[in-house]
């Protein structure tokens, strides 16, 4: 008896069926049977199914005598199933990698529930994936398993068959079956959830569901099938008094679905909307439960459907359409007027005297308080308290700004006033291209890392990375710099070549790394506790850099697999590059913690026990902690071809180098990640790239730039620095127990 029976009905999906079946058979969890049902498809679906059945004994081909439709085809597959759990896929869907293993683990963890609800992503015509917006309802926090009344929000999750796993004995005992019709999922999903004695959730995308193109949308008659399917739903509830409490909830869901069909462009021809609305009005009257108020946000749609106000609805839609058409030109005009007013305001402010006691800071084009400018802003308030500081950031990042610092929103009149009249301007990327530097103003460019990848003028030879590089604008911006920070000789030489200008280089170290020398073990303990890192765990900070040659950014590592192989002592803190545009692991669960939105990467470094990265400049900063660094470079040739590097990282690495996921697992499993050879490599790396980061870089900058001092604090030699040890090193000085490497991905202690 297999663990899973995956049922795939196929009708006119020959272009996608092979990928669907391959996604099931290639799962890392192999205890399954695949039942592919040819719904008398006129294309090659039947032949494709037979080919798969001939080559893999886990595939069972079912050929229907005549075309029956989606529901009956699923029933035919269910009748052949022998697995513990049933899963349904449409012929154009695919299972995500390792989805069945995640489902199996969650089923075991929650005590074999009747139903497991998992997440899915929608795939458009171009292949772009978007996670379903109701994902928040699938949280795994709280008691599990549970009943529907404990989590009624599950009824807001799309009512489809393919986002759940069903215990076969439960389905057979209750006699559930799919009816015919386009919307057969409705009278299946709702009764199943209401009848289930135990339900669990899995907050992970397990299915990629292909969305229909406009030409593939169902015929008009299929939309009227909604009425019949909801009749079946309410017919199931009516003779069962214990389910009466769900009637108002499902009634509101019915109205929402009918409204979506009525109002979504292109779904109903104009000539039959009135007829559809009449049918909707009759169903509203038939299934409405008196005494249950309608939410305020839904009253309009309920009123239109209840009274059959088709003309009113049409007039409302026309008014909205007219409003949208007039709103765009009005908005463009308003933006133009605002831009002109701000330009005039900035011009006027530049005529007023500079304020010698003002400084403006920014980082990463409007992100929160942090990096080198953040450390310098704190140093300004400490060593030059007469300077009033302000930070430019978008509103969603204002919570990261200290209370003593003024908050500025980019593009506002206050922002332009500060740029025009503040003496000190500090940034780690490019200053606003509309900035006009005034006599007496001091622009301090901090940058945000030691350059391993090509930067500045060197990008002219790398069109994939350069994008729309404007060399003239770049050089104009460099001409405005007064000071440029550098943490080592390699950086100094590189900056002065790729950013040629008349500025003064300050080889004082990076202020953002000062905290590494000042932090205490109590600080590390507090940070790990705030991140939820279990005591005694080894926390790996995984921080890959941006890939210029990829249109979409994704993690090259299967972090769940890595952690399964390494054992329960390890956890991963996953952080995406600031250009990633979202979390590195959107569906992180268990021992993978996505920390992309954490405001301080320095805090993450302190909380971790080791760093895994590829070509990120974070390795140079992390080396100041004298903690293990492992390089995972599985795409070195592609990366160097697209972006280019200033030296071969393999020949001067800060630690062990892995060329594949399996090599990375071996490095940690054998203890090589913190062995003597790795320590030797790290020592040489620190000698070359960490000469100035002794904890007083920010102080040196402020004393020189603001206070005009020349006798600056001497740099503490590397041998005399004592950065705070990692939690794992402080807790356990003995080598970690080695983890044997299994021959396959199947856990050694697998119980099934």
Image (spheres, grey):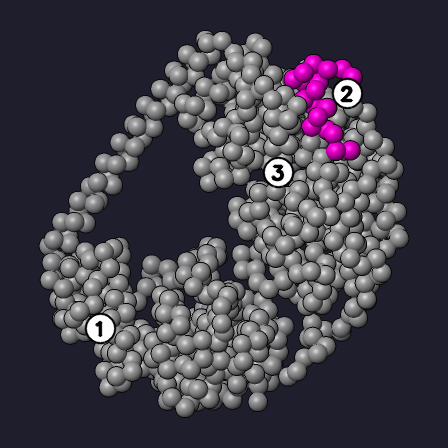
How packed is label 2: few (under 14 Cα within 10 Å), some, or many (20 or more)?
Answer: few
Furthest residue to the front? 522
Residue 475 in view, yes or no: no
Q: Is residue 297 magenta?
A: no
User: How far from the left and from the top, in percent, is residue 557?
Assistant: 66, 58
User: How far from the left and from the top, in percent, is residue 56?
Assistant: 60, 81
Say whether disc 2 or disc 3 marks the residue closer to the N-terminus.
3
Q: Secondary structure beneath disc 3?
A: helix
Say whether disc 1 or disc 3 marks the residue closer to the N-terminus.
1
Q: Which residue is mark 3?
A: 465
How packed is label 1: few (under 14 Cα within 10 Å), some, or many (20 or more)?
Answer: some
Q: Nearer the viewer, mark 2 or mark 3?
A: 2
Q: Relative to 572, is 253 above or below?
A: below
Quadrant of the rendering where the C terminus is positioned: bottom right
Q: Which residue is mark 1?
A: 227
Q: Secondary structure beneath disc 1?
A: helix
Q: Which residue is mark 2?
A: 712
Quadrant of the rendering where the N terminus is positioned: bottom right
Are the residues at dot 2 and dot 3 in contact (C-beta closer than 8 Å)?
Answer: no
Task: Read off the magenta span.
Answer: 694-711
Q: Nearer the viewer, mark 1 or mark 3?
A: 1
């Amino acid at each position: 008896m297999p663990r899973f029976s995956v049922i795939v009905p196929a009708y006119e999906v020959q272009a996608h069926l092979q990928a669907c079946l391959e996604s099931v058979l290639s799962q890392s969890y192999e205890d399954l049977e695949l039942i592919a049902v040819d719904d008398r498809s006129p294309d090659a679906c039947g032949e494709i199914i037979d080919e798969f059945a001939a080559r893999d004994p886990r595939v069972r081909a079912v050929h229907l005598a005549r075309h029956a439709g989606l529901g009956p085809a699923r029933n035919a597959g269910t009748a052949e199933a022998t697995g513990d759990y049933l899963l349904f896929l449409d012929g154009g869907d695919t299972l995500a990698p390792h989805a069945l293993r995640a489902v199996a683990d969650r089923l075991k963890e929650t005590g074999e529930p009747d139903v497991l609800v998992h997440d899915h992503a929608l795939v458009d015509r171009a292949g772009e994936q978007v996670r379903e917006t109701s994902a928040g309802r699938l949280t795994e926090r709280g008691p599990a398993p549970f009943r529907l009344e404990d989590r009624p929000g599950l009824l807001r999750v799309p009512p489809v068959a393919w986002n759940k796993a069903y215990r076969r004995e439960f389905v057979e005992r209750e006699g559930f079956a799919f009816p015919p019709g386009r919307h057969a999922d409705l009278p299946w999903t709702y009764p199943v959830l209401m009848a289930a004695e135990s339900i669990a959730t899995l907050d992970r995308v397990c299915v990629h569901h292909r969305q229909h193109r406009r030409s593939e949308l169902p015929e008009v008659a299929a939309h009227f099938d909604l009425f019949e399917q909801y009749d079946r739903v309410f017919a199931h509830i009516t003779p069962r008094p214990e389910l009466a409490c769900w009637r108002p909830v499902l009634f509101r869901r019915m109205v929402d679905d009918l409204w979506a069909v009525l109002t979504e462009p292109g779904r109903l021809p104009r000539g039959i909307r009135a007829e559809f609305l009449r049918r909707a009005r009759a169903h509203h009257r038939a299934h409405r439960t008196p005494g249950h108020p309608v939410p305020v946000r839904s009253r309009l749609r309920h009123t239109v459907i209840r009274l059959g106000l088709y003309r009113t609805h049409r007039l409302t839609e026309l008014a909205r359409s007219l409003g949208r058409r007039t709103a765009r030109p009005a908005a463009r005009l308003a933006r133009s007027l605002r831009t002109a007013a701000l330009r005039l305001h900035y011009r006027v402010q530049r005529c007023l005297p500079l304020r010698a006691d003002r400084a403006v800071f920014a980082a990463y084009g409007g992100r929160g308080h942090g990096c080198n400018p953040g450390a310098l802003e704190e140093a300004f308030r400490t060593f030059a308290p007469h300077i009033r500081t302000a930070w430019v950031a978008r509103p969603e990042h204002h919570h990261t700004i200290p209370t003593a610092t003024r908050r500025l929103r980019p593009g506002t009149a206050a922002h332009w006033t500060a740029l025009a009249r503040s003496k000190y301007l500090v940034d780690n990327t490019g200053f606003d291209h509309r900035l006009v530097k005034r006599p007496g103003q001091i622009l301090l460019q901090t940058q945000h890392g030691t350059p391993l990848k090509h930067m500045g003028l060197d990008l002219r030879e790398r069109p994939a990375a350069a994008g729309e590089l404007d060399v003239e604008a770049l050089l104009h911006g460099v001409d405005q710099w007064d000071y440029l920070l550098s943490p080592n000789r390699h950086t100094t030489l590189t900056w002065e070549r790729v950013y040629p200008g008349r500025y003064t280089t300050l080889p004082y170290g990076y202020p953002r790394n000062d905290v590494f020398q000042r932090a205490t073990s109590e600080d590390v303990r507090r940070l790990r506790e705030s991140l939820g890192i279990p005591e005694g765990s080894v926390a790996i900070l995984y921080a890959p850099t941006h890939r210029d040659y990829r249109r979409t950014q994704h993690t090259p590592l299967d972090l769940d697999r890595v952690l399964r192989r390494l054992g329960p002592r390890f956890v991963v803190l996953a952080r995406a590059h600031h250009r990633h545009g979202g979390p590195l692991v959107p569906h992180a669960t268990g021992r993978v913690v996505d920390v992309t939105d954490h405001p301080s990467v320095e805090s993450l470094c302190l909380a971790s026990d080791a760093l895994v990265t590829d070509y990120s400049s974070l390795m140079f900063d992390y080396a100041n902690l004298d903690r293990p660094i492992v390089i995972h470079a599985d795409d070195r040739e592609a990366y160097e071809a697209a972006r280019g590097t200033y030296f071969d990282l393999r020949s001067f690495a800060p630690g062990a180098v892995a060329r594949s996921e399996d090599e990375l697992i071996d490095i940690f499993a054998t203890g090589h990640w913190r062995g003597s050879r790795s320590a030797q490599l790290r020592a040489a790396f620190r000698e070359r790239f960490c000469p100035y980061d002794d904890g007083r870089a920010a102080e040196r900058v402020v004393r020189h730039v603001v206070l005009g001092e020349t006798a600056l604090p001497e740099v503490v030699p590397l041998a005399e620095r004592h950065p705070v040890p990692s939690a794992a090193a402080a807790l356990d000085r003995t080598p970690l127990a080695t983890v044997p490497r299994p021959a396959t991905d199947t856990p050694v202690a697998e119980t099934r």
